[in-house]
């Protein structure tokens, strides 16, 4: 089975490409570019995990390509190994000053090339593990609040440009503090894990994002989702939590949403974010919907604990 590690090989010599591709056939995806501009285009379409870059290229030199990578926020951290037929300390010094990670000579030693590539693969795995520790809530496996808010902000721009709908659900475990006090923290932790698993089970798309928001509260971001679809997801969430056998808990959900270009007008029982609003406003709207659900001033939908704000917040957004 091939190792999942994306490599971009940039060289204008077809012979070198054939040799490297045979040596690195165990890695996937393995992409090739014979010009600097093609290399930058491929990298910007999908950032590689490692770049093997010839110093001498016909349009842009390897050094110029390296500079372009380091100036691009999405590519700056990608390690670059220069490949060159020149044994020159001066060239190596220039490359390292530009931010390159290493140099390999031509023709390459298969064992040396594989050793170098596997080293950077291991470094990436270690980096991913550290990043996961920072961004994931260890207890539930959901994103931390900070990472969740960052993910929403990043996707917000894409959705706004495409004029697509989106929704944010805030889901609160009812009387979670009392459960913790009554049954102990170990039981409370088990409940949080079970609820997180239940919420994951009702999301059906890879773009949906689950976060641990605060205490017994979770957040679910649903891009490309209309108000009606968001309400359906909320109902599934409540039903999934209600069916947990070990923990007899219920869920209350507040929904905030942003209309897309083809959405119908906002009905009185929905909390809509005003056009041109910010991600912060989306969170504020969902939080108000959840507060109204708690206080009983929201509209109950289909006898479930799903509430949305009765008052339009468009004028105040």
Image (spheres, rainbow, N blue to C red):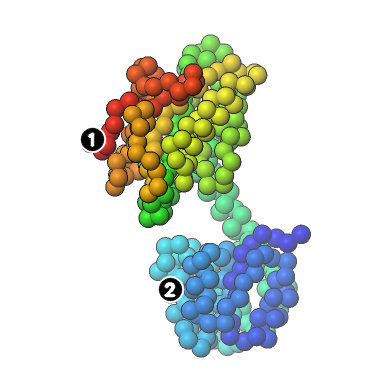
Q: CA distance from mark 1 to mark 2?
A: 44 Å
Locate residue 307, reporting x and y percent: 41, 24
Write down the quadrant of residue 26 in the picture: bottom right
Locate residue 34, reporting x and y percent: 57, 82
Please tell me whether residue 18 is drawn above or below residue 289 in the rendered image.
below
Q: Residue at 60% of width from left, 18% of height from top?
A: 247
Q: Which mark is residue 119?
A: none
Q: Is 77 on the left or on the right of 191, as rendered?
A: left
Q: Are marks 1 and 2 in contact (CB under 8 Å)?
A: no
18, 103: nearer the viewer: 18
Residue lying furthest right in this view? 1
Residue behind mark 1:
316
45, 255: nearer the viewer: 255
Residue lying furthest top in this view? 182
Label 1: how many residues lie within 10 Å, few (<14), some (14-19) or many (20+)? few
Locate residue 57, reporting x and y percent: 52, 86
109, 259: nearer the viewer: 259
Please tell me whether residue 4 is drawn above or below residue 217 in the rendered image.
below
Residue 71 visible somewhere in the drawing: yes
Q: Residue at 39% of width from left, 38% of height from top?
A: 257
Write down the quadrant of residue 270 in the picture: top left
Q: Which quadrant, please, contains the N terminus?
A: bottom right
Residue behind mark 2:
68
């Amino acid at each position: 089975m091939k190792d999942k590690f994306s490599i971009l090989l940039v060289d204008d010599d077809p012979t070198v490409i054939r040799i490297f591709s045979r040596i690195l056939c165990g890695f996937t995806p393995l992409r090739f570019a014979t010009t600097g501009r093609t290399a930058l285009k491929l990298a910007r379409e999908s950032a590689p995990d490692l770049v093997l870059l010839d110093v001498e290229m016909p349009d842009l030199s390897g050094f110029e390509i390296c500079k372009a990578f380091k100036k691009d926020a999405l590519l700056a951290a990608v390690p670059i190994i220069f490949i060159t037929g020149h044994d020159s300390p001066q060239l190596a010094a220039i490359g390292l000053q530009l931010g390159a990670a290493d140099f390999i000579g031509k023709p390459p030693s298969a064992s040396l090339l594989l050793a170098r590539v596997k080293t950077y693969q291991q470094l990436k795995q270690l980096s991913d593990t550290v990043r996961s520790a920072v961004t994931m809530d260890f207890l539930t496996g959901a994103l931390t609040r900070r990472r969740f808010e960052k993910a929403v902000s990043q996707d917000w721009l894409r959705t706004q440009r495409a004029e697509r709908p989106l929704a944010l659900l805030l889901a609160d475990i009812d009387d979670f503090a009392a459960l913790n006090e009554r049954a102990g923290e170990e039981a409370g932790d088990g409940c949080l894990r079970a609820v997180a698993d239940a919420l994951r089970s009702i999301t059906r798309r890879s773009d949906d994002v689950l976060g641990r928001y605060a205490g017994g509260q979770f957040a679910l971001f649903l891009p490309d989702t209309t108000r009606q679809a968001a309400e359906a997801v909320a109902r599934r969430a409540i039903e999934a939590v209600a069916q947990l056998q070990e923990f007899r808990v219920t869920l209350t959900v507040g929904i905030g949403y942003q209309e897309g270009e083809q959405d119908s007008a906002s009905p009185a029982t929905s909390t809509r974010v005003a056009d041109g609003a910010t991600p912060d406003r989306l969170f504020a709207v969902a939080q108000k919907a959840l507060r109204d659900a708690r206080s009983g001033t929201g509209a109950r939908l289909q006898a479930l604990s799903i509430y949305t704000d009765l008052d339009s917040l468009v004028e105040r957004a």
